[in-house]
Amino acid sequence: MATIHRTTMEPGKLELLAAWLPGQEWFRPGGGELVRAGGFRLDDPAGEVGIELMVVADGRDAYLVPMAYRGAPLADAPEGALIGTAEHGVLGTRWFYDGAQDPVVRAELARLLRGEAVPQRQSESDAVDEDVAVSPASGPVEPVLRRVLAPLGEPAGDPAPGEAVAAYTAPDGSVRRAVFVADGRV
């Protein structure tokens, strides 16, 4: 299980994302300042990569940004995968990558969709996030992230097989549920 350190990080995650998000084709600029709006973590079985599925919102949209935190640069990282670097008060320099392009994150997302990975709370060590609902798929899966979150209708039902649904705070301040990741083979 990942240990959450209560320490400083310069620049912070929101600062890194504010610089990186405008370059993404799925981002809609002009919505205003980014704020944290939810998410959860997954554990790397090898204990080397921090994995966070972070939701940020501006005044108009909520975005899912899965991030990999690494202690060294990712070898052969795809163009545009690096979100940025930051100085962590305990762990030193961290390289932040777009989790959609990180092999460890992609493997854990596939494990999540098969019901093999346990979602963890975003800001607590060793705490299962009971708000994340997963309907496991059988066999191989191809995780597809929902970058711009679309709230499920009310009442939100159970996820379909091969979907992971979680809560976030919408730009209007209401708590909503949305599909974060789904099996693209379905």
Image: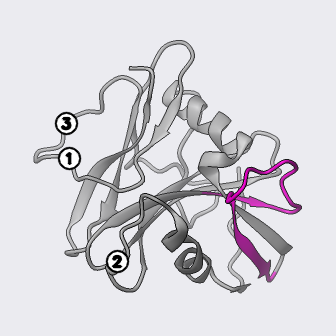
168 relative position to 174: left or right = right
Residue numbers of the magenta segment: 67-89
Name the secondary structure under disc 1. Answer: loop
Is residue 42 visible to the viewer in this orientation of the structure? Answer: no
Which quarter of the picture shows residue 66?
bottom right
Residue 131, image x, y percentages: 37, 49
167 relative position to 50: left or right = left
Residue at 85% x, 75% y: name it. Answer: 93
Q: Which residue is mark 1?
A: 152
Q: Which mark is residue 157?
A: 3
Which quarter of the picture shows residue 59?
bottom left
Q: Which one is in front, 104 or 75?
A: 75
Is residue 145 visible to the viewer in this orientation of the structure? Answer: yes
Magenta stretch encompasses residue 57: no
Whether tag 2 and tag 3 are in contact, CB under 8 A, the answer is no
Mark 3: which amino acid?
A: Gly
Counting residues from the start of the chain, the first of labels 3 and 1 encountered is 1
| Label 3 vs label 1, nearer the camera | 1
Q: Judge whether 162 appears above or below 106 on screen.
A: above
Q: Which residue is mark 2?
A: 58
Whether tag 3 and tag 1 are in contact, CB under 8 A, the answer is yes
Residue 70, image x, y percentages: 80, 60
